Amino acid sequence: MKLTSRQLNKELGKKSYRRFLLNDKLTDIFKDFQVTRVVDLGGSNVEGKKYFKYPKHKAKEWITINISEEALPDVIGSIYETGLENASVDAVVCTEVFEHLADPFAAIAEIKRILKPGGIFIGSTPFLFKVHGDPDDYFRYTESALRNVILKDFSKVELFSMGGGLGTVGMLITQVTNDMKYRLIRYAFIFLSRMMILTDYKMGHERKADLTTGYIWRCEL
């Protein structure tokens, strides 16, 4: 359901435009989701206003794997070596992780190894977004890189842009306002960025875009 400007403004007070779009699309993807075993690679069991609350009740088993103890994962482990059996997982979720991977190809190989034939792979990664270490930030992927390189061995690839040019630039403006010394100038830029984001949202944020905050995908092995 599309939000009104007032509703979106309220959401943007809690999270970034990119995080809002990501959460909104994940809600849509998981709407008819029903599987037995899910592995969330790089996920967290820490709840927060800006984070997406995964529908864990839609799976008999939902395992979170993360290298960070602070994320309170079910298993402390690496995306490169999960320790799971071959073809033992119905779905893999890996959101906002691939930009932090020094070897994305090793990660894809591990995901393919643990997924059952026909298993679902849901992921996301930023494109035009600030550098953010967790602990490091290595890559940004174009649509071609995702379709033709990272996800080339998967079928039924659905790839969605998260935001168009106006919203992306508006979000980037928001990200630099905290460094502005003068409050009036900062507020002016915040107002401008919010107007750009609201316009982008009304134009249809899922349209194909060359300037986008990032991508989210759903595909099958």
Image (tube, rainbow, N blue to C red):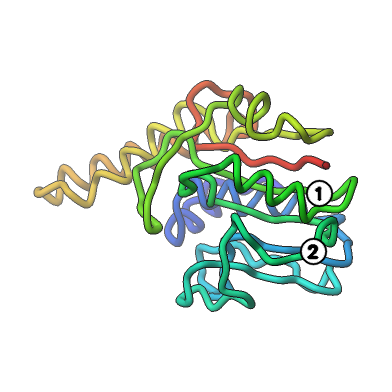
According to the image, label 2 marks what residue?
85
Residue at x-position 75% and y-position 71%: 62
Residue 208's place in the image compared with 199, above or below, is: above
| 169 w.r.t. 184: above or below | above
Q: Which x, y percent locates residue 215?
A: 59, 37
Mark 1, Cα crowd under 10 Å, few <14 / some 14-19 / many 20+, is many
- Given the image, on which type of amino acid does mark 1 rest? Ile
Mark 2 is surrounded, within 10 Å at the Cα level, by few (under 14), some (14 to 19) or many (20 or more) other residues, namely: few
**Residue drawn at (43%, 34%), measured in percent from left and top?**
128
Write down the quadrant of residue 174 in the picture.
top left
The residue that appears at 79% across and 64% down in the rendered structure is 85
x, y percent for residue 69: 48, 77
- Front residue of 121 and 194: 121
Give left or right: position of 217 versus 60: left
Name the side, left or right, on which 192 lies relative to 30.
left
Image side of residue 83 versus residue 17, left or right: right
Label 1 sits on residue: 120
- Give the alpha-carbon distance from disc 2 to disc 1, as whole Å: 16 Å
Label 2 SS: loop
Specify the label residue 150 is tagged with.
none
